[in-house]
Image (cartoon, rainbow, N blue to C red):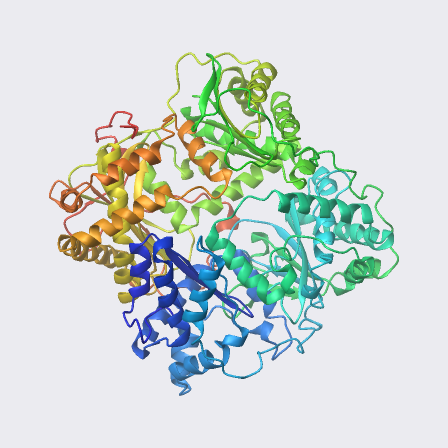
């Protein structure tokens, strides 16, 4: 409501329109004790934007009739949040707080709490809103951060001039610090079994501690979670992995308002269990308690605290600039939390070693004070309680007496658990290398053989001692069958599992690595301080070269992969993408195909022979950037070639799909969501442009940029169809198009009605751009050019862009410069004609609907999300295609994707290069 016009600038969507016009963006987020608003815009318009912004906090209009529409946005956000296990768990956890404590509140808000219930109780939401604004939006407890290339004196002058009018209510800042110990209740110290939405087994052990925020100079919880969450030798996870009980573990405090505020701090340890681990969850908890007890007995360790301090200090000292809008957001929050001298550093650095503060936190982590939450679909049928807001099914019981007795006694320590050894991956050499070849603006190919090639660029801009190394191991085997894709996924997951322990030390020392099972190859990415980075890269290649696995690991990873696939299928947005690409990309295997293949069972032999075949013939492409010489860069590729000893590919393997040519009509593919009882629907309307050039691609980007704000204003603000509404420029394997997406709920709207509303929006939009003034057109062109000219804030942005050119084998490293040239030649009539061509009777249009459960889709009143889950029975979901209703006449409905697309022409391979 604050963003919807002010006395000085009354236009409801005026601020958003102003920002969009000048390449900017804005956002706001609410938390337990603070709300943060932020925006960014082109520097030239910064002062004007600041003035418009400040008025929201001086004289916001907050018009009464906008309330109902904005309540719908809040309600839609709540509906989207419902199927998330993290949100459900948090809500359940909050419900265990003492009666009357704010931690027990409903943090989301929905139509019931903001509209229907107030009406019944004669409460005027509007008056409440104004009162809230007057009580909490007061100058003396607001903090402000502005970042811009103007001088500090200029910025200070602007801020004084623009923000002085913000009212001060003279009341003391609201405080909650007296409401301590929200969870000091008998309900807290029990075992809760919960039925999750996704397929997962997990155990969370949680303690509620006194607030720790004031100890930010020592960071006791950071120290404890560093040890508990360690994955190297002697750690909890290392022990649990060897038992095949756990796949992952993370511990600590996420520093959200929910986990850390002025009333308490959370410390939790979450373990992702295997099927076997689920059966032994009490033993898993026992291992955690043994480790914590070992830490308590030993007391804080100065060597380890200093190692953490050193790693954080290195990271801080050589950090790369973050996106300014994220930076001002985090500083603004820091100003609410830290002493003035620590505003810039308080969230990152460790300042003083105070063992007594660490020991104090550590000693509160006793088994008697813990709360246990066990999530698993296997709990279905035995959970008869229901959390009020999200409908989460759960049950509560006392912790087994045998275990409570053991934990109350002086139980034995576990000899396999000990503190981590000294870390050999911490960088000590931060010198910048001298170049050994001419410097270039873009990457250059410095090695090219039949087995692979290497692109290289030495950093001359950011001048920090870090490197980025990325490799793509391309193989035509992957896309040959659904089975091969699943074997490949399994292989990459086992490889990542095998590396978990040996590579953890590097991970901790801020050397990051990631293995990705790409569509056409294995992607290996490493980055961090260049000093020890080659060690990590060689470790990964060694494990790839000597790949091996036991039947037990195979079993564990395939079980987990089933859950992963299933969890992708039940999300409307990921299912919608899968269906859209399945129609458009020829020869693509669907997620359902993959899931069915996996459920039908894979043999250990098939994995071994796949991996052997994969490693025997490859084409390897790499990119090395940062603080490396060209000679060091070549060593990376040489290491891969020598270690893997593979033969070159018989013929080159395209790293893209061919795309079907859609017919000149409106196609509709409508499927029911696979998450039983989930009300969320997703509607995407896609227009295909075909094989196009760079100029047309930039024209499409410009069109979508013009569309963003009116699209939001029409479909969300005015029509309140859903929380997420957005247009997108689509490059599908080189074939251009655009789409408009709306997420809605079947409890409120029918998906076809939403489709019609998108159509209505596009018609209005056509009128709008036909009458667009020339200066508004050129302003938008300038804004897009400025966004493309905007320099990278850190090396990673440049590397991402270059890597995208390598991994797609387009190699157009100066793409941005060419797009800017193309933009300068565009006229308003180009834009109008381009849009009208897509809307003419030659239009190629595809609507994809993933339809939720609700009365507007003809479902009887639907039970809560998790109740109707049939996931645990292990039956394999299949897509249910729905026919169009009488609403959508003139459409061709797709009932069988493969059968339909086999009748269409397949376009030749295409890349947008010229």
The answer to whether 545 appears left or right of 38 in the picture is right
* Residue at 75% from the left image edge and 60% from the top image edge: 400
Near-viewer residue (678 or 430): 430
Q: Residue at x 54, y 21 (%)?
A: 630
Residue 880 makes an appearance in the image? yes
Of residues 860 and 817, the one drawn nearer to the viewer in this rendering: 817
Of the 4 image quadrants, the one containing the C terminus is top left
User: Can you name the residue that lies furthest to the bottom here?
Assistant: 122
Relative to 186, say whether 275 is above or below.
above
Q: Is residue 677 left or right of residue 387?
A: left
- Residue 257 in view of the camera: no
**For residue 82, side relative to residue 246 (left or right):** left
Q: Position of residue 380 (x, y in %)?
A: 56, 57
Q: Position of residue 135 (x, y in %)?
A: 49, 81
Q: Position of residue 44 (x, y in %)?
A: 35, 54
The residue nearer to you, when weighing 742 against 421, is 421
Position of 850 with respect to 285 (left or right) is: left
Tell me if residue 143 comes above or below residue 218 in the rendering.
below
Up/down of 41 relative to 470, above or below: below
């Amino acid at each position: 409501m604050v963003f919807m016009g002010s006395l000085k600038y009354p236009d409801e969507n005026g601020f958003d329109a102003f920002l969009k016009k000048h390449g900017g963006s804005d956002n706001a987020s609410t938390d337990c004790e603070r709300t943060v608003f932020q925006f960014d815009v082109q520097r030239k318009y910064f002062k004007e934007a600041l003035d418009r912004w400040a008025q929201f906090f001086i004289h916001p209009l907050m018009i009464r009739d906008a309330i109902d529409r904005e309540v719908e946005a809040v309600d839609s956000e709540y509906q989207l949040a419902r199927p998330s296990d993290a949100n459900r768990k948090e809500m359940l956890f909050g419900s265990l707080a003492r009666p009357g404590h704010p931690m027990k509140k409903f943090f989301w808000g929905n139509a019931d709490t903001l509209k229907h219930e107030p009406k019944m109780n004669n409460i005027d939401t509007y008056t409440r809103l104004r009162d809230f604004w007057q009580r909490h939006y007061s100058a003396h407890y607001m903090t402000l951060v502005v970042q811009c290339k103007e001088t500090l004196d200029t910025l200070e002058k602007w801020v004084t001039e623009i923000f002085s009018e913000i009212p001060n209510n003279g009341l003391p800042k609201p405080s909650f610090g007296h409401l301590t110990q929200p969870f000091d209740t008998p309900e807290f110290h029990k075992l809760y079994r919960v039925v999750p939405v996704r397929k997962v087994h997990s155990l969370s052990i949680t303690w509620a501690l006194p607030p720790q925020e004031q100890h930010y100079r020592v960071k006791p919880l950071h120290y404890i979670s560093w040890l508990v969450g360690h994955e190297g030798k002697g750690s909890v996870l290392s022990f649990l992995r060897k038992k095949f009980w756990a796949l992952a573990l993370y511990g600590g405090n996420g520093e959200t308002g929910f986990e850390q505020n002025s009333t308490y701090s959370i410390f939790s340890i979450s373990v992702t269990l295997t099927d076997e681990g689920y059966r032994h969850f009490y033993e898993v908890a026992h291992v955690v308690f043994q480790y914590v007890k070992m830490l308590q007995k030993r007391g804080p360790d100065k060597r380890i605290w200093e190692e953490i301090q050193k790693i954080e200090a290195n990271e801080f000292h050589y950090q790369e600039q973050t996106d300014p809008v994220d930076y001002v957001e985090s500083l603004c929050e820091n100003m609410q939390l830290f002493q003035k001298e620590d505003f810039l550093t308080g969230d990152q650095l460790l300042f003083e070693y105070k063992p007594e503060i660490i020991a104090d936190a550590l000693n509160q982590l006793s088994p008697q004070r813990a709360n246990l939450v066990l999530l698993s679909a296997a709990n279905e049928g035995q959970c008869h309680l229901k959390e009020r807001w999200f409908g989460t099914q759960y049950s509560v019981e006392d912790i087994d007496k045998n275990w409570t007795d053991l934990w109350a006694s002086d139980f034995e320590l576990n000899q396999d658990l000990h503190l981590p050894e000294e870390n050999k991956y911490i960088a000590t050499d931060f010198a910048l290398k001298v170049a050994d070849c001419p410097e270039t603006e873009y990457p250059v190919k410095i090695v090219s053989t039949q087995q692979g090639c290497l692109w290289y660029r030495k950093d001359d801009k950011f001048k920090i001692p870090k490197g980025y190394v990325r490799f793509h191991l391309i193989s035509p085997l992957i896309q040959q069958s659904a089975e091969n894709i699943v074997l490949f996924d399994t292989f990459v997951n086992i490889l990542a599992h095998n590396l978990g322990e040996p590579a953890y030390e590097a991970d901790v020392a801020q050397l990051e690595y990631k293995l990705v099972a790409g569509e056409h190859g294995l992607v290996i990415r490493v980055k961090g301080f260049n000093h020890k980075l080659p060690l990590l890269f060689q470790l990964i290649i060694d494990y790839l070269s000597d790949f091996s696995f036991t039947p037990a690991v195979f079993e564990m990873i395939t079980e987990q992969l089933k859950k992963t696939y299933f969890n992708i299928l039940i999300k409307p947005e990921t299912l919608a993408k899968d269906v859209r690409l399945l129609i458009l990309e020829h020869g693509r295997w669907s997620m359902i195909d993959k899931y069915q293949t996996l459920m039908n069972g894979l043999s250990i032999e098939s994995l071994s022979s796949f991996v052997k075949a994969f490693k025997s013939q490859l084409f390897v492409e790499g990119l090395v950037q940062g603080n490396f010489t060209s000679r060091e860069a070549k060593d990376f590729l040489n290491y891969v070639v020598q270690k893997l000893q593979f033969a070159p590919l018989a013929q080159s393997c395209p790293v893209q799909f061919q795309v079907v040519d859609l017919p000149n009509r409106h196609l509709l593919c409508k499927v029911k969501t696979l998450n039983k009882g989930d009300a969320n629907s997703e509607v995407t309307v896609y227009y295909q442009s075909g094989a196009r050039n760079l100029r047309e691609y930039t024209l499409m980007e410009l069109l979508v940029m013009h569309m963003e704000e009116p699209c939001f204003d029409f479909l969300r603000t005015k029509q309140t169809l859903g929380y997420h509404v957005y247009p997108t420029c689509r490059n599908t394997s080189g074939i251009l198009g655009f789409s408009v997406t709306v997420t809605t709920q079947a409890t409120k709207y029918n998906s076809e009605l939403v489709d019609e509303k998108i159509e209505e929006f596009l018609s209005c939009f056509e009128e709008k751009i036909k009458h667009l003034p020339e200066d508004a057109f050129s302003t938008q062109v300038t804004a897009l050019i400025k966004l493309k000219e905007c320099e990278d804030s850190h090396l990673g942005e440049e590397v991402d862009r270059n890597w995208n050119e390598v991994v797609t084998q387009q190699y157009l490293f100066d793409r941005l410069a060419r797009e800017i040239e193309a933009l300068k030649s565009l006229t308003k009539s180009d834009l109008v004609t381009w849009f009208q061509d897509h809307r003419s009777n030659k239009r190629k249009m595809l609507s994809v609907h993933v339809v939720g459960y609700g009365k507007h889709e003809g479902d009887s009143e639907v039970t809560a999300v998790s109740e109707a889950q049939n996931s645990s029975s292990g039956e394999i979901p299949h897509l249910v295609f729905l026919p169009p209703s009488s609403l959508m006449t003139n459409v061709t409905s797709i009932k069988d994707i493969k059968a339909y697309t086999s009748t269409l022409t397949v376009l030749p391979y295409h890349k947008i290069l010229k």
